[in-house]
């Protein structure tokens, strides 16, 4: 007759065997696993960095001792010389450093400077950051979006623009955009008076509603329409615009009020259910904080060339995602900045679409190529390593920088200053 198994004896024996096996495993002189391949990515140092002022663009060029060169877009059409100066202030923090330490170098350029924040810092950091991601992607032979976590989506919806000094002209252009396959269109209606250096809230509201009605009738309900306000309105007029626009179902009203006091959005939010968006004049995650955590907006619109670059836009997206706010990134850049915008848009989960001025027609770059390809209203991934674009340095250096033109000096009827 078999003796019953003693549980303590069994566990003890099992433990002894396990210990013996463990001891054997640690004592093995060699592993049977295949050896890991040696690192083929060269250990790099930044040897040179410089602003590249060409045409109306401010680019950043970063060179490494491995022969890999990265490019970023730091363009600010309103403050190019201050961005150039900020870049010259930051570049000493880069020389001799490892370009793969992107987060470290971002913090170094931002936090080692006593004065920080604002558009010049945001744009200069954006150009540096994009160039570092471009270097890293080229070093590993993969598109930047792969380094950001891979494709969260396989294509990105885009929106185009219409202009025109009459509602009829704007509607005609909107039909053309729809025929190109675009499913979302942005417009501004009050710029017909810019040549006269004049802005009056009541007239501008009336114009925007006139344009909105004409465009909606021309393209039907299947195209989303975006009202761009450029931050011109005082809160009471933004509220009035939202009230009159609501029957025409805009996707959102963009920048309804000035951005200096984010609590002005609260007043607008309390008086309308029309979706609101803001963010192109925010230059880091801290600028976005109040609008996001107070949930005054439905969409956030940072610009990868203005908000500190790819690294900071990923952080902004994560902040917004906590509150179920999606991004519609602002983008008026050429192929370089548009490429950086697209890489982030492909990688983040909370994205609705991106601004794509190149999709208005058959755009082609000059110094940088290509623009992302658009099919049926969606931009497709750029497949090359890094940002996936090429920069013609000889052409860039041969193209003189054009000083920015003064913006319209807008006044109200009584001669007081109005916002551009």
Image (cartoon, grey):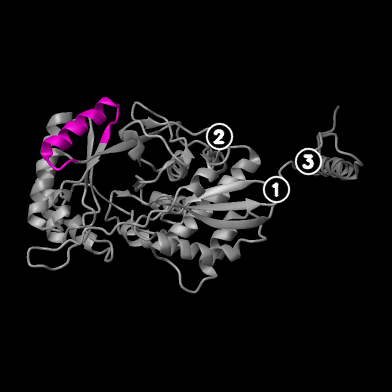
What secondary structure is found at the residue carrying circle 2? loop
- Tell me how far mark 1 sits from mark 2, CA to CA: 19 Å
Q: Given this view, does label 1 or label 2 mark the residue nearer the observer?
A: 1
- In primary-sequence order, the first of circles 3 and 2 is 3
Q: Circle 2 is placed at which residue position?
A: 384
Does the rendering let one see residue 301?
yes
Q: Report crowding for label 3: few under 14, some 14 to 19, many 20 or more residues within 10 A (C-alpha).
A: few
Q: Please determine whether, in this image, residue 315 is positioned above or below residue 379.
A: below
Residue at 7 percent across and 53 percent down: it is: 203
Q: Circle 3 is placed at which residue position?
A: 38
- In primary-sequence order, the first of circles 1 and 2 is 1
- In primary-sequence order, the first of circles 3 and 1 is 3
* Residue sitting nearer the eye, 327 or 45: 45
Q: Circle 1 is placed at which residue position?
A: 66
Q: Report crowding for label 1: few under 14, some 14 to 19, many 20 or more residues within 10 A (C-alpha).
A: some
**Residue 353 belongs to magenta span:** no
**What's the magenta region?**
164-184
Label 1 near label 3: C-beta < 8 Å?
no
What secondary structure is found at the residue carrying circle 3? loop
Q: Report crowding for label 2: few under 14, some 14 to 19, many 20 or more residues within 10 A (C-alpha).
A: some
**Residue 168 belongs to magenta span:** yes
Residue 146 in picture, x, y percent from top left: 56, 39
């Amino acid at each position: 007759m078999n003796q019953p198994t003693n549980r303590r004896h069994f566990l003890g024996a099992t433990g002894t065997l396990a210990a013996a096996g463990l001891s054997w495993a640690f004592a093995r002189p060699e592993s049977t696993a295949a050896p890991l391949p040696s690192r083929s990515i060269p250990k790099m140092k930044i040897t040179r960095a410089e602003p590249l002022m060409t045409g109306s663009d401010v680019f950043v060029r970063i060179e490494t001792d491995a022969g890999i060169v990265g490019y970023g877009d730091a363009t600010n059409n309103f403050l190019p010389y201050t961005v150039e100066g900020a870049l010259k202030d930051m570049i000493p923090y880069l020389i001799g450093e490892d370009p793969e330490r992107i987060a470290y170098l971002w913090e170094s350029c931002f936090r080692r400077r006593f004065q920080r924040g604002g558009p010049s810092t945001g744009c200069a950091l954006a150009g540096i950051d994009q160039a570092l991601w471009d270097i890293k992607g080229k070093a590993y032979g993969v598109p930047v979006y792969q380094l950001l976590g891979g494709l969260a989506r396989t294509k990105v919806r885009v929106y185009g623009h219409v202009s025109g000094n009459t509602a009829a002209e704007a509607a005609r252009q909107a039909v053309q955009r729809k025929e190109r396959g675009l499913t979302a269109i942005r417009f501004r209606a009050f710029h017909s008076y810019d040549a006269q250096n004049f802005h009056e809230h009541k007239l501008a509201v009336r114009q925007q509603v006139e344009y909105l009605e004409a465009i909606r009738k021309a393209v039907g309900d299947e195209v989303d329409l975006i009202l761009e306000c450029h931050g011109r309105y005082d809160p009471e007029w933004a509220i009035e615009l939202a009230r009159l626009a609501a029957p025409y179902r805009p996707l959102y009203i963009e920048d309804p009020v000035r951005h200096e006091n984010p609590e002005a959005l609260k007043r607008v939010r309390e008086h309308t259910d029309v979706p609101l968006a803001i963010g192109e004049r925010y230059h880091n995650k801290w600028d976005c904080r109040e609008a996001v955590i107070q949930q005054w907006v439905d969409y956030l619109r940072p610009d990868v060339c203005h908000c500190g670059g790819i690294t900071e836009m990923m952080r902004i997206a994560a902040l917004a995602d906590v509150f179920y706010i999606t991004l519609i990134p602002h983008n008026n850049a050429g192929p370089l900045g548009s490429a950086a915008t697209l890489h982030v848009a492909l990688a983040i989960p909370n994205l609705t679409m991106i601004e794509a001025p190149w999709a208005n027609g058959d755009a082609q770059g000059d110094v940088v190529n290509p623009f992302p390809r658009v099919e049926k209203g969606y931009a497709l991934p750029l497949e090359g390593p890094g940002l996936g674009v090429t920069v013609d340095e000889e052409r860039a250096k041969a193209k003189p920088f054009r000083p920015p033109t003064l913006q319209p000096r807008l006044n109200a009827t009584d001669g007081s200053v109005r916002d551009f």
